[in-house]
Image (cartoon, grey):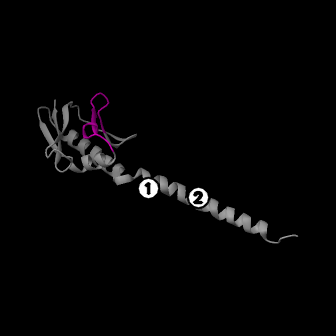
Amino acid sequence: MRRRGTGESLQSTIAYTLAFLAFFVPLSIYISTSQHNAGYWEDYYAKKLALILDRASPGQELYLDVTEATRVAASNGKSPYDIFVFDNVNREVIVSLKQGSATRFSFFSNVTVVDPTVQLISGGVDVNRLHFSIR
């Protein structure tokens, strides 16, 4: 017995399934990478710190509220003490709010960042600040 239309039905089902996967897989990858807006906050803090360093003078002691960064990092399983890195040799600020991800932003002034530490004022992620000195 010959069935008509079975091949066309199977082909259209496969085509729709592939089209669905072609849309769904990139969408789910995007959603998983933008978890808790980590990319946005990495970019925000890297640019903000670079701007602060461009305007800084040797001898200054600076504090920056980083409560949102510590909250996002904690939700992604990242230690608050590993969020901010200052590369004085290459003049870069590196901010990482999740494992395997970081945003780098360059600053142009000839300053050196000394002793950067995240201070967990409340003992958690409620009110925190980044403290560093400029030389």
Please, is residue 55 above or below residue 12 in the view? Answer: above
Of all residues, the one furthest to the right in this rendering is 1
What element does badge 2 sit on?
helix
The part of the image, by quadrant, that contains residue 77 is: top left
Q: Which of marks 2 and 1 is nearer the N terminus?
A: 2
Q: Is residue 48 visible?
A: yes
Residue located at (73% from left, 64% from top): 11
**Residue most toward the top?**
89
Residue 60 rendering spot, x and y as whole percentages: 12, 35
Q: Does the magenta stretch include residue 80?
A: yes
Question: Front-most of 51 and 40?
Answer: 40
Q: Name the residue under label 2.
A: 21
| Residue closest to the eye, 20 or 3 | 3
Residue to which mark 1 is pinned: 31
**Side of 27 where 73 appears, left or right:** left
Indicate the amino acid at tag 1: Ile
Q: Quadrant of the C terminus?
A: top left
How far is mark 2 from mark 1, CA to CA? 15 Å
The answer to which of 63 and 75 lies nearer the viewer is 75
Percent from the top left, x then y, of residue 15?
67, 62
Residue appearing at x 32%, y 30% in the figure:
90
The answer to which image quadrant residue 5 occupies is bottom right
Position of residue 47 measured from the top left corner of the image (x, y, whole percent) = 28, 45
Q: Which of 7 and 97 is in front in this view?
A: 7
Q: Magenta region: which residues?
A: 77-94
